[in-house]
Image (cartoon, rainbow, N blue to C red):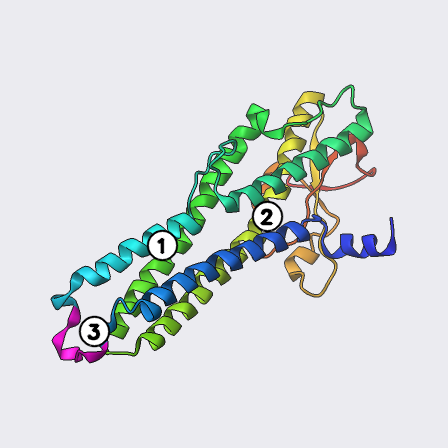
Amino acid sequence: MTKKSKNLLKTDPTRTITLRNRAVGDINRRYTKVQRLVTESIVTNKIFSNARALDQADFVFLRSPDKLEAFNVWLTSVMHEIIVGGTATPNSAQLNWMLHYYKESYVRGVKKTNNNFAGIYGRNQIPNRVDVLSVPYHIAKTSLLFTRDFAQLKGITDVVSQQLSFYLSEGLLKGQNPNKIAKTLKERIDVLGKTRSRLLARTEIINTHNLGMINEGQALGELLGENVYYEWITAEDIKVRDSHISRNNKFYTYEKVSQLIGEPNCRCATPAIPESQLPEGTKVIGK
């Protein structure tokens, strides 16, 4: 292993930084497209151009509620097409674009554990996971996981849509210039959409990778009739939480480690270790 590879492993123990960066780039492009369409609708197409001439006392929405309602319906369709379209079914051709990143990360985690165990026990004892999501155990695990993650993404877009509707109506009531309204909406998309979605993606790509390693560890442990434990490995830099530093190189049971992973922006890894491979006298937390 090169010095560069060793340094990368220390700061990115799950080796998912490229996948995370791809997801963040996709998020930025998609929300930027939403911003462009919102600005185009309000400023270029001037769908609310009469609002500038109205006084707040006229209460524009009592006179033309259909305009705001039409915008909200349109925005919902835009969000669905660009951000929350698709399904949460792991093997579906219509799997949501964000969940594709989680799927890839989960599969990587499964294969990492599988290959490590094959190196210890031999491929003749360890089934080769060529198609991870053809295994019923992993289908069940990812189905539950993706349903939760999809709901989180929808929750973000629901908040964005609600806030855009509010600030749009606020701007119209105050008779603001369409450019000012569009700028405010763009800022809300940045704060509520891009920022929260990026945090979700970074967190869940690592979480799904760890879950892939953990779940495969449990499956192979049952197959082999051996207990499997999980080592906590931190990213060795100043960004690591103190509580995670205290866990570094410690071993945990499945039940215990499952409760610890998935904190926002956590970059720690939890590789599976068969009990027979633990150093003599190793204490396992949760046992």
Q: Residues within 10 Å of mark 2 (few under 14, many from 20)?
A: many
Q: Answer few, some or many: residues within 10 Å of disc 1's Cα (few below 14, many 20 plus, some between 14 and 19).
A: some
Q: Where's residue 179, x and y in %?
A: 35, 76
Query: Dot 2: what SS?
Result: helix
**Quarter residue 67 falls in:** bottom left
**Looking at the picture, which amino acid does disc 1 mark?**
Asp
Q: Which residue is mark 2?
A: 205
Instruction: Name the side, left or right, on which 194 lies relative to 126.
Output: left
What is the C-alpha distance between the residues marked 3 and 2?
Answer: 46 Å
Q: Which residue is mark 1?
A: 158
Q: Amino acid at mark 3?
A: Asn
Mark 1 falls on what kind of element? helix
Q: Position of 155 compared to 238: left or right? A: left
Residue 263 in view of the camera: no
**What is the span of residues highlighted in magenta in the rendered image?**
52-60
For label 3, the crowd category at 10 Å Cα-Cα, with few meaning under 14, some 14 to 19 and many 20 or more, is few
* Tally of numbered tags: 3
Q: Residue at the spot x=17%, y=78% of the render?
A: 54
Q: Is residue 254 above or below residue 64?
A: above
- Residue 258, quarter of picture: top right
**Disc 3 or 1, which lies upstream in sequence?**
3
176 or 9, nearer to the observer: 176
Q: Earlier in the sequence, mark 1 or mark 2?
A: 1
Predominant secondary structure in magenta? helix
The residue lying at 76 percent from left, 20 percent from top is 125
Residue at the spot x=80%, y=57% of the render? 7
Q: Amino acid at mark 2?
A: Ile
Q: From the top left corner, tell me how far across and down residue 166 is, in percent.
A: 28, 66
Query: Which dot marks residue 124?
Result: none
Tell me the tag on residue 50.
3
- Mark-to-mark CA distance, 1 and 2: 22 Å
